[in-house]
Amino acid sequence: MDQPAAPPGHVLRLLSRLVAAVETLIALALIAGFARKLTYISAATFSVLIWATAITGPFTVSSIT
């Protein structure tokens, strides 16, 4: 079964920078204690989205071993 094509490099760079920015904002909000309940819910939701993306991503066990 063929694997789907990986996105172009510029898309991956943009996505990685976006994820880094969101993680930084979450960290700053947690450290500052800003909107704690909203921050906790947002961080948990973001974590689940990242986890779900990793599970359904283009990589399989055979491609990384």
Image (cartoon, rainbow, N blue to C red):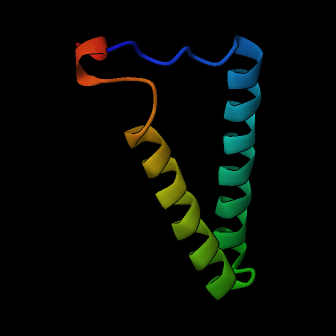
Query: Which residue shows up at 45% across the image and 32% down it?
Result: 57
How many numbered discs, if any?
Answer: 0
In this rendered view, identify the residue nearer to me: 40 or 64.
Answer: 64
- The N terminus is located in which quarter? top left
Which corner quadrant of the image does residue 15 belong to? top right
Query: Which residue shows up at 74% across the image and 58% down it?
Result: 25
- The C terminus is located in which quarter? top left
Decide if residue 29 is on the left or right side of residue 37.
Answer: right
* Whether residue 29 is situated above or below residue 5 in the rendered picture: below
In this rendered view, identify the residue nearer to me: 3 or 30.
Answer: 3
> Residue 49, how many percent across, how many down?
53, 55
Query: Which residue shows up at 31% across the image and 24% down it?
Result: 60
> Residue 11, how many percent across, how many down?
74, 23
Which corner quadrant of the image does residue 2 belong to? top left
Decide if residue 36 is on the left or right side of residue 1.
Answer: right
In this rendered view, identify the residue nearer to me: 14 or 55.
Answer: 55
Query: Which residue shows up at 68% across the image and 82% down it?
Result: 38
* Whether residue 55 is situated above or below residue 36 in the rendered picture: above
Which corner quadrant of the image does residue 17 belong to? top right
> Residue 35, how many percent across, how many down?
73, 84
* Whether residue 37 is situated above or below residue 54 in the rendered picture: below
